[in-house]
Amino acid sequence: MALPTITWISMAIAIAALPGVASIALVKSLRSEERKLNLLKKQDAVDSYSPRTLAELREWIQANPNDTYAPVARQRYNECVETLREVDEPYYDWSPEEIDQLDRLD
């Protein structure tokens, strides 16, 4: 049973597009990691969470203070806050005002 023409065209497009898309994603990822590595070499530290992720982590800690993972989450949160205060150039898009507003969780 022969495949319809549209199937062959779809397979050819997928075969042609997949390596291109994968290459673009790989190059973007490697550039991002290279930037992070350069910051790490220059500053000996790099922030581990984006503003949105750190805000979500804080919300989770406040909503689940008695969870078994809360102490670890609190420690990670506080480490990120301290790192943001120490580094000259954050990896993620943090403004100085956002960093100044962060408080440690105890």
Image (cartoon, helix red, strand yellow):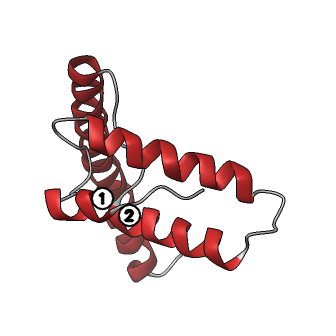
The picture places residue 87, in percent across and down from the top left corner, at 24, 35
Residue 42 seen anywhere in this rendered image of the structure = yes
Residue that mark 1 sits on:
17
Q: CA distance from mark 2 to mark 1?
A: 5 Å
Residue 48 seen anywhere in this rendered image of the structure = no
75 relative to 33 in the view: left or right: right
Q: Which is nearer the eye, 21 or 15?
A: 21
Q: Residue at x 17, y 63 (%)?
A: 97
The picture places residue 48, in percent across and down from the top left corner, at 42, 45
The picture places residue 59, in percent across and down from the top left corner, at 55, 75
The picture places residue 88, in percent across and down from the top left corner, at 16, 36
Q: Amino acid at mark 1?
A: Ala
Q: Amino acid at mark 2?
A: Ala
User: Which quadrant would the C terminus be assigned to in this image?
Assistant: bottom right
Height in image: 49 above or below 65?
Answer: above
Height in image: 87 above or below 59?
Answer: above
49 relative to 33 in the view: left or right: right
